[in-house]
Amino acid sequence: MSEKKPITFGIICLLLATMLIATVTVLNKTDQEIRIKSDQISEMETEKNIMETQILNLQTETNSLTNEASTLKDQLSILQKEKYSLENEKSTLKNENALLEEQVVSLQSEKLSLETQVSNLQNEITESNNNAITLEAQVSILQTEVNDLEDEVIQNYNLGYTEGESNGYDKGYDEGFIKGIEYLTETGYYLRDPTYAEAIEFINFDKTDQNDYTHDYVCYDFTADFSANAVQAGYRCGFVYLIFIDGAHSIACFNTIDQGLIYIEPQNDEVVTVAIGQQYAGYVITDLGIIW
């Protein structure tokens, strides 16, 4: 009896060991299966995420395509309107083209008419040019005759002017001198020589230069009026006569007490320089004299 117990215990232990091994084996298989399942689940989740991403992308593409479709519809509508507008323009252009063709025909007719007129005008111009050449020749002849007459008139005018000026100067000089002496004797003015500044002030104040030179009012009259105004102002003023080869001229002068003798052209109030042998107003002075 005591020998059977160890055997039984051994068998039990063996059974337990076998069961334990079987259990461990089963557990190992289960763990592997669980791992496989976990891997499969992980793969499925990954695929799920990928599919969700693809779905989102598809939705985005769908929205984009929807927007593009809407845009294309709008563009199609615009193009249809443009097509309608272009068709109207085409119709208008056809009408305008027809009108232009009619105008071209009309203009061609006018062109032919104008060409005929131009041809006629060219013939008239040629005839006019021939007439102009003839007239130019006649004008040239007349111009030569006119130039000859003008030269003769100028020569006669210069001769008459020189003689008249010389005679008028001599007569006016004598009469003015006598009247001046009589005037001074009658009035009893005390005259003095001015300073240079006083002379310039009087020249600027005097208005004789504003008179007009005429056939009846010449250089002698300018000088006489200037001298008379100077006498009225109390200044001694000289009557200067300039002798040229073929004429004469008169101006005025002051014998200033600080700068000496100065000559004045009373026609323009300029202080001038004169001397025998020097030119004045384009003429050479051959002689000069001063009457105080």
Image: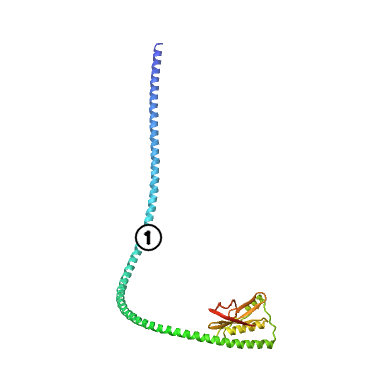
Total number of numbered discs in the rendering: 1
In the image, 16 versus 37, the foreground residue is 37
| Secondary structure of residue under mark 1 | helix
Residue 104 seen by the camera: yes
Task: Check disc 1 and give the amino acid type.
Answer: Ile
Drawn side of residue 30 relative to residue 171, left or right? left
In the image, 221 versus 205, the foreground residue is 221
In the image, 289 versus 20, the foreground residue is 289
Residue 215 seen by the camera: no
Residue furthest to the top in view is: 2
Q: Position of residue 92 (x, y in %)?
A: 34, 68
Residue at image position (39%, 20%) is 17
Q: Quadrant of the C terminus?
A: bottom right
Q: Position of residue 30 (x, y in %)?
A: 39, 29
Residue 137, by quadrant, is: bottom left
Q: Position of residue 219 (x, y in %)?
A: 57, 83
Residue 256, by quadrant, is: bottom right
Drawn side of residue 150 relative to residue 273, left or right? left
Is residue 21 depicted above or below 272 in this figure? above
Residue at image position (47%, 84%) is 155
Crowding around mark 1 (Cα neighbors within 10 Å: few <14, some 14 to 19, many 20+) is: few
Q: Position of residue 64 (x, y in %)?
A: 39, 51
In the image, 98 versus 57, the foreground residue is 98
Q: Quadrant of the N terminus?
A: top left
Q: Which residue is mark 1?
A: 78
Is residue 134 depicted above or below 73 in this figure? below
Residue at image position (38%, 37%) is 44
Is residue 90 depicted above or below 229 in this figure? above
